[in-house]
Amino acid sequence: MAKFFRAAIMGPPGSGKGTISKRIAQSFGLQYLSSGHFLREGIAANTEAGVMAKTYIERGMLVPDPVMTRLMLSKLEQLSSHSFLLDGFPRTLAQAQALNNRYQLDLVISLNIPYETLKERLSDRWIHPRSGRVYNMGFNPPQVEGKDDVTGEPLIQQDDDKPEALMARLRHYKEVAKPVIDLYKSLGILHSFSGTETDRIWPYINSLLSNKMHTLAQDAHQSQ
Ligand code: G5P
């Protein structure tokens, strides 16, 4: 039977989870699920969960575990026979345990980025709300200032990137992530990467995943 590859990427706000996830999804063909993207979709569509989530996100707080777990596990159910990459979930120990009851991850990437770098990046981030395309005025600016490259529609700054919400998000991350990181460390599947530039971290992640995929393909071949 085919073995599916299941991974998650963790890191504080602005650490490059979204940027790196898109590269991983493109290079290795994994289905990509971003908790933040699903929440923003719900907010834009004015769903009941979206309206509720907005009140937390605006204050830089985490959305409650039962809401997040229900949302993400229902998305994962549609992917039960796929390899996938989770971005932004699980974020708390309760979420990690709920996930683990249904799916065992093969690998978890944790990004360690200095605080000053995170602050700079996030205050420079603009997004195209309908597609979720992300720009950074220094790292990957749009072709025309303030406009999405594909549609030409205006870019906005997310409420949770504004300074008051940003500080709260960075503070919360550390305390909440520690037990999750400890759990994945104890399972022997945690891989941590440190640095200030995504382009320098990426080759290491790329090579880790290439090796894992290769081993997985070999195991599947031998079990045939
Ligand atoms: P999200 O959407 O999961 P965060 O806060 O975890 O949001 P965020 O802010 O989206 O994470 P990221 O994905 O880690 O950051 O980083 P990114 O978007 O790729 O990069 C950040 C910026 O830096 C971009 O502009 C990018 O272009 C730029 N950049 C990347 N690399 C470099 C580089 O090397 N150099 C430079 N100069 N720039 C670079 O969650 C949002 C909210 O939803 C709720 C929470 O309230 C959360 O705050 N939420 C949850 N709540 C509870 N449980 C969960 N599981 C939840 N998931 C989401």
Image (cartoon, grey):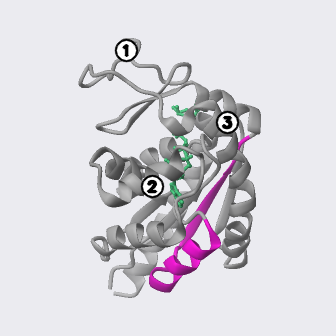
Amino acid at circle 3: Leu
Q: Nearer the viewer, mark 3 or mark 2?
A: 2
Q: Is mark 2 within 8 Å of ligand 1?
A: yes
Q: Quadrant of residue 138?
A: top right
Q: Give the secondary structure at mark 1.
A: loop
- Label 3, residues with CA under 10 Å away: few <14, some 14-19, many ≥20: some
* Residue at point 39%, 58% (across, down): 33
How far apart, in angstroms, are the residues tagged by discs 1 and 3?
23 Å
Q: Position of residue 112 (x, y in %)?
A: 71, 48
Q: How busy is the neighbourhood of tag 2: few (under 14 within 10 Å), some, or many (20 plus)?
A: many
Q: Which of the two discs, 1 and 3, labels the residue nearer the N terminus?
A: 3
Q: Position of residue 53 (x, y in %)?
A: 45, 55
Q: Nearer the viewer, mark 1 or mark 3?
A: 3
Residue 59's place in the image compared with 208, above or below, is: above
Q: Is residue 21 magenta?
A: no
- Direction left: furthest residue: 151
Name the residue carrying label 1.
143
- Locate residue 131 relative to residue 69 in the image: left or right: left
SS at mark 2? Answer: helix
**224 versus 66 height, above or below:** below
Residue type for callout 1: Gln
Work out whether residue 64 or residue 178 is closer to the camera in this orientation and state it. Answer: 64
| Horizontal and vertical percent position of residue 195 | 72, 40
Mark nearer the N terminus (3 vs 2) = 2
The amino acid at mark 2 is: Ala
The residue segment tinted magenta is: 92-113
Q: Residue beneath label 3, please? A: 118
- Name the element at disc 3: helix
Residue under pointer 2? 53
